Amino acid sequence: MYLSVYVNNNIYKLRGPHFTGCRSREQETFRCWWSAGIFQNLTEPGALRVFYQTKNFLSEWQECPDYTRTVKNECYFNKTFTQIWTSYCIQLRSVRENITYDEACFTVENIVHPDPPIGLNWTLLNVSRSGLHFDVLVRWAPPPSADVQMGWMSLVYQVQYRVRNNSHWEMLDLESGTQQSIYGLHTDKEYEVRVRCKMSAFDNFGEFSDSIIVHVAQIPSKESTFPTTLVLIFGVIGVVILLVLLIFSQQQRLMVIFLPPIPAPKIKGIDPELLKNGKLDQLNSLLSSQDMYKPDFYHEDPWVEFIQLDLDDPAEKNESSDTQHLLGVSRSGSSHVLNFKSDDDSGRASCYDPEIPNPEDLASLLPGHSGRGDNHPLVSRSSSSIPDLGVQQTSEVEETPIQTQPAVPSWVNMDFYAQVSDFTPAGGVVLSPGQLNSCPEKKKEEENEKKIQFQLVSDGAYTSENTARQLSASVPPSPGPEQGYQTFPTQAVEGNLWNGEYLVSTSDSQTPYLLPEAPPAPILPPVSDYTVVQEVDAQHSLLLNPPSSQPAICPHSPNKHLPAMPTMPMGYLTPDLLGNLTP
Amino acid sequence: MNRLKVLQAWLWCVSLWPCWLSHAVPLDCKDETGSLTQCTSISQEKLLDRVIQHAELIYRVSEESCTLFEDMFIPYPLHALRNQGGNLCHTKPFPIPGSKSEIQQISDKWLLHSVLMLVQSWMEPLIYLQTTLSRYDDAPDALLNKTKWVSDKLLSLEQGVLVLIRKMLDEGILTSSSIFEHTLTPYNEQSPEVLESILRDYNLLICFKKDAHKMETFLKLLKCRQSNKLSCLSY
């Protein structure tokens, strides 16, 4: 019975006596409750009565079998009165007024609210590696009142959990078993867990069980740092291994980058091994083909001075006197001391920078400088080379600042060899005129040489102006060539003058003096001024060449260039070759 | 109408023909390759477990179908009908007790026979239900599928129960079709009113759910008795 009341825009439904609910706990008994509602006059017991009716073959209404004494307004149906799969209808009547206030129909299984499960507990499944999360397994037992074993009731359970004092409950899926896992709980947080059950295929949940507290203390972060350090260590080791492998694989390239190879001394075309182990002939042939190699080779040998003469301008050479030639040569010889060219070279001084004579080098060539006493530019070349020398000197004069000699002294008249007749006390060398040979063009030079005796200073053969005059004065007047003396250069080399001393070699008388117009001189007497050392025997004595071989020495063609150094000139011995010959 | 009844009876006899031969003809099973071979033997406990699983599933699906139908077609005030457990469920030849104590006193034989009877009594109504539900405009596919599924499962449940009867009770079954004639009658009439037909279908679903629950309960009780006789007896 309802009574609607409208108060302040709200409708209140006021209800008379009515059933408040019926429940069964175990599907074997059930209870129903009612309320008197607003009709307070019906609250005394017995005023309202409950009648029920089952729809199974029984149509008469029966009164409630048991009004519970302890609980107000409760009707209890025990086992004998409870049937499942049967519809019940109950009525709330006021017997006195014979009014049915409320009626309800149901079946017992539809009003079953199972008791809560019992024995709820939890066990720790695992803790995450970081120590921040953990999983638990929650277990319970079915309510003892429910006969699940017989199958009278098939229960399903629902677990709920929440962070303690939180308002929201997490609900898990229905579980027909009696345990369930909860994953992803946070350590250091307290959780409440509870469980309830209902009959499967029905909607009525029972009451919740008592909550249990689940809590796992957080493990200190020592474990979390441990894998971090491990990772760091392994990472470093891996990087180191990688670097080592890289270095080893690229060793060659890295070596080139960090330690660039120093260029070994190398000559193009020459195998270093050959130089070490090669035979002399092979070496000679090799070196002759090398431009670069000769100067060093020559430089080691102060005795050797190969001067190339260019015979393109013979007139120039003839203009200068012997003395001039000698002096010029000597002067240029000083430059030539350091100036070594190949035979095929025209004799340009500019090709070799170190060959430009330094002032100190020239100073070393002066008398008194005993350290360089070896560097005697005393070698006179063959006549063929002399014309070359003249031009060479002129070219040198043009190019080298030191050389200022305008005239071209030529050694055309000079012999290939000059005999040292005497030494001056100051260390100078006195040359005797070369031997007469069959070369007619050299006649004049030979004459001059005979007449003129000039001293060669250690640093080079030159003479001052005074001495030149003296020389020229002492010389009997002779045409042509002697005039060359007049034009000898007035070159002053650093103030060092020729000391002016000269000695007339008496040994010159050995060579016959010939007038320029005289016919060519006869062949040299058997005893020559010099001989060529052919070889050195075991006793370190020199074996000399026979003199007859000397004319052959005279080069026939002025154009003939001197043979290359490696090819041994006939009768001439270089020191290193001497060393080779030493047993 | 008589012809129709005869035809239905004949159909039932034909469908139950294998039961008559259940003694002589073993059931054929399909192994993994798909060929038919003689079924591998299974223990009685396992068979009972499987039968119980069938019953449980059928019961759950029937409940879901009922809920679906209720949500779709039944107005809210009439939802209380559900709690009433269905009125006018088709009557059975013999009453089944409803109290636990009474049920506990039922023998195994009666339990099995009751289950068999229940299963067999619901086969045709389910077919009818499928036809009616398909005629609904907005019937959800889930409902139709569930109904179809339940029909199929019911057949296999019947097979299992028959085997159980043969194994546990050592008796063959000869079912008579006369039982089913009575049960089929109420469902052949078409009601002109829409609401009435809806309510009737709703009632059918509710009744089926109740009977499915009965099947499950009986089978579970049977299992309890098989494993542990002491706890299952009435106290």
Image (spheres, grey):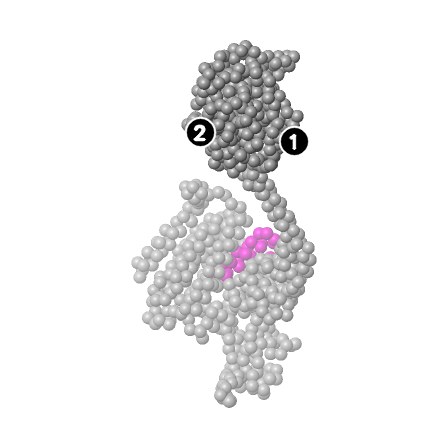
Q: Main secondary structure of the magenta part?
A: helix
- Residue A504 location (% of width, % of height): 59, 21
Q: How many labels does the image show?
A: 2
Q: Which of B205 and A385 is in front in this view?
A: A385
Name the quadrant of the C terminus of chain A: top right
Which mark, by number, is residue A239? none
- Residue at 64% across, 48% down: A233
- Residue A22 location (% of width, % of height): 56, 73
Disc 1 marks which amino acid?
Gly
Q: Name the residue under label 1.
A: A368
- Residue at 53% across, 11% down: A525
Can residue A183 be seen by looking at this rendering?
yes
Q: Mark 2 points at which residue?
A: A316
Horizontal side of A391 relative to A194 (left or right) equals: left
Label 1 packing within 10 angstroms: few (<14), some (14-19), many (20+): some
**Which image quarter: residue A491?**
top right
Can residue A116 be seen by looking at this rendering?
no
Disc 2 marks which amino acid?
Glu
Query: Which residues fall within the magenta stretch?
Result: B212-232
C-alpha separation, residue under disc 1 versus residue under disc 2: 34 Å
Q: Which of B15 and A340 is in front in this view?
A: A340
Q: Nearer the viewer, residue A131 or A337?
A: A337
Q: Nearer the viewer, residue A360 or A485?
A: A485
Chain on which label 1 sits: A
Query: Which of the two discs, 1 and 2, labels the residue nearer the N terminus?
Result: 2
